[in-house]
Image (cartoon, rainbow, N blue to C red):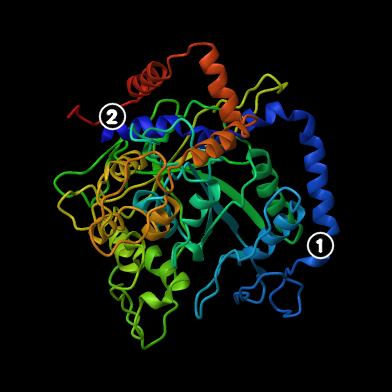
Amino acid sequence: MENDQHKDSGHGNALQTAVQNTTVMMENHQHEDSSRGDALEANSASNSSDLGNDTSSKDAASTSPTPIASSRPEVKTAPLETYILSAEAKLAFRLPTRTTPVFPSFPGSTPPTLHSDRENKIVLYCGAFNPPHAGHAALLSHTYFSTDSSTIAVLILPTRTVSGKLNLSNADGRHFRLTYSQRSSLWQDNLLSRFSWVFPGGGYENMLWYIDFIRWAAKEHGFKISFSSLSGADHAYSLGSPWDSSILIRITSDITRAVFFAKPAKPDPVKEPQIRRLADCEPWEDLPQEELQWEGGEEEEKPKCWPCWPCYKMRKVYPEAFDDKGRSTVSDHFVNLATAPDILLARCHAAPKLLKWCQCIDPEVRLERLAHKQELAAHLVFIPSTQDPNSPTFFGPMSATSIRQEFLEADILAPEFRRQMSEKVLNVNWLCTFLGWEMAEENVKRPRESSCTGYDDSATERLKKESDGAADDSTAKRLKKESKDDVDVDSVRERSKKSMLDLAKEPGMDDE
């Protein structure tokens, strides 16, 4: 399984690399750079009267369907959704029309809110997500709840296509290729959707415009927004890649698979792990976080774990997870077991408390089009999790490759299979519907003919056309070039990994 995980991640990290290294794509569009910046400033200025920028005025124009959170009188606040909708309106000719709110509104729940007295951080989470599974949800939620309140939301960025992945089909003619809209729909969740949203789609260039419009519109009203990129441990090896001047923070965790630079402490895995110093990086340091104040009433019990960012943020976004005394309750009605609030909180509580980060020394931002070197304060953030296999909150390795294989090899469509897969994937019933599987009350043999529902030749041809239509993506161009040059991708990846391991400095660590 571990080999499958590395193969799966190796084929599908194109958009992940692109978001971390946006200057590479910009090189192909440098004739648009100046016009894009001018357009952003012009649009921000022309629409300054359309966006609310002070919560003291209830008639401030805002297209957000969610309430504006209250704050101290001297600090301006505004819902992030206002600026998301503004960006989508400016890109209406490029993006599909939105028919639902960005963040669903619930009584007592606080939507992602901008504050004028701090930096408002949005995490970019990229991947193929074919399909979104419990490991993806664990990494996303662990990152959000483990960081302080300045991290306000997560933007999910599925790749346009899933070409190049393993286990997309088998010899019997079955296919596991979800469209962009299907993969986006599978991210809908009663908890995650309160602080994360999926990019409407339309390609990498539109994504660049999208995040820039959000940032510039907020800046026009006194709010600072910054973006960081989130990836699994398998993508943490790419420290030598060029950095983008607007995305300087990379975040990773060992929650779904181990990282090569961190080793659990013995005999207590809950304690701070031993972390190797990375080549070309400064020593690891504690990640600075905001000071946390208790805001509960007299009738509420302060958690024993306090001060605790996971508990604080869970109370803000999902107050239903607590009783009238402020105590965490057990979730027994969640469709997605992987996102049950009590499970997520227990996982955060079992993890080492201190987050770490290190600065990359002289990151590679020198491109041919740049006339001078640009030194950036780029950082890698590491969010540890419990690595104790005996802990009930331990999250074992999981990959989309192995999940696709299980679905492709399943001969019986039974409620029991769905129950098993509900622990691994998000919205299992929707997923089965997208694959053409009808609900079965008892064991039913699935036909193996290639013309069966959900696996017909027309669907295959349609997916092939969809993949061909994305030929202008940087991913497609790179794969085409590698194919032309007969590049041995596996050997290159193996040499790159070995090089990183050889370069890593190992003070105070053994080779076990």
Element type where label 2 sits in the image: loop
Element type where label 1 sits in the image: helix
Foreground pick, 195 / 75 = 195
**Which residue is disc 2 drawn over?**
507
Q: Quadrant of the C terminus?
A: top left
Q: Residue at x 68, y 43 (%)?
A: 206
**Which residue is disc 1 drawn over?**
48
Q: Earlier in the sequence, mark 1 or mark 2?
A: 1
- Give the quarter of the image for residue 273: top left
**Residue 237 visible at all:** no
Residue type for callout 1 = Ser
Q: Looking at the picture, does residue 281 appear above or below residue 341?
A: above
Q: Residue at x 60, y 59 (%)?
A: 118
Count how many numbered circles sit on residues in the image. 2
Mark nearest the camera among 1 and 2 is 1
Q: Residue at x 32, y 55 (%)?
A: 353
Counting other residues with Cα less than 10 Å from the Cα at mark 2, is it few (<14), some (14-19), or many (20 or more)?
Answer: few
Q: Residue at x 61, y 76 (%)?
A: 67
**Residue 457 visible at all:** yes
Q: CA distance from mark 1 to mark 2?
A: 53 Å
Taking 412 as reference, is 116 left or right?
A: right
Foreground pick, 67 / 301 = 67
Counting other residues with Cα less than 10 Å from the Cα at mark 1, is it few (<14), some (14-19), or many (20 or more)?
Answer: some
Residue 217 place in picture, x, y as percent: 74, 56
Residue type for callout 2 = Pro
- Give the quarter of the image for residue 121: bottom right
Q: Looking at the picture, does residue 402 appear above or below residue 446?
A: above
Residue 64 place in picture, x, y as percent: 67, 70
